[in-house]
Image: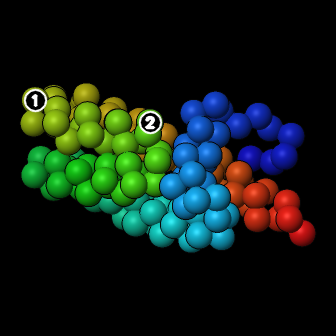
């Protein structure tokens, strides 16, 4: 996302929420975001692996684990989708489950790109 693109409103809210959680400290927010995004990428890979292996317990566990991190960072939309998957996975057919996981991956990508761009701008605004 370059400086000319408009950040989706929910992503901007997520970025501002993270900054609030970190008491406005952009460096701390950037560290927290990078840690979350690295860990969340592994969790999303785990969701896909659970789907491929027809392992609903893995899907539920990975969704729960990732939702907690998203919630701690203030990434509300991502946390909500992960929590929904955690609670509904056992009743979903494989096609719906795959679609839900890919929607989570899409939201993750959008959130990651937007939040990191927002934080990059916040870090350099004081220079």
Q: Position of residue 40 (x, y in %)?
A: 40, 59
| Secondary-structure class at tag 1 | helix
Q: Nearer the viewer, residue 91 or 21?
A: 21
The residue depicted at 17 percent of the width and 48 percent of the height is 60
Q: Position of residue 19 (x, y in %)?
A: 60, 54
User: Which residue in the protein does label 2 denote?
Assistant: 77
Q: Residues within 10 Å of mark 1 (few under 14, many from 20)?
A: few
The residue depicted at 10 percent of the width and 29 percent of the height is 91
Q: Nearer the viewer, residue 18 or 80?
A: 18
Relative to 115, residue 127 above or below: below
Q: Is residue 28 left or right of residue 4?
A: left
| Secondary-structure class at tag 2 | helix
Relative to 79, residue 21 above or below: below
Disc 2 and disc 1: Cα gap in Å?
Answer: 22 Å
Q: Position of residue 114 (x, y in %)?
A: 65, 47
Which of the two discs, 2 and 1, labels the residue nearer the N terminus? 2
User: Which residue in the protein does label 1 denote?
Assistant: 91
The residue depicted at 40 percent of the width and 66 percent of the height is 39
Which residue extends farthest front?
23
Q: Is residue 40 left or right of residue 60?
A: right
Relative to 36, residue 79 above or below: above
Indicate the quadrant where residue 13 lies. Answer: top right
Indicate the quadrant where residue 124 lies. Answer: bottom right
The colour scheme used here is rainbow
Relative to 63, residue 98 above or below: above
Closer to the observer: label 2 or label 1?
Answer: 2
One can see residue 112 in this view:
no
């Amino acid at each position: 996302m370059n400086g000319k693109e408009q950040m989706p409103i929910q992503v901007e809210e997520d970025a501002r929420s993270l900054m609030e959680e970190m008491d406005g400290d952009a460096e701390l927010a950037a560290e927290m975001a990078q840690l979350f995004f690295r860990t969340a990428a592994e969790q999303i890979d785990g969701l896909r692996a659970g789907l491929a292996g027809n392992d609903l317990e893995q899907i539920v566990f990975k969704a729960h684990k990732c939702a907690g991190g998203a919630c701690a960072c203030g990434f509300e939309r991502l946390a909500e989708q992960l929590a929904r998957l955690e609670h509904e996975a056992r009743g979903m057919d494989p096609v719906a489950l795959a679609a839900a996981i890919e929607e989570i991956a899409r939201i993750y990508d959008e959130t990651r790109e937007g939040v990191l761009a927002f934080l990059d701008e916040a870090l350099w605004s004081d220079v």
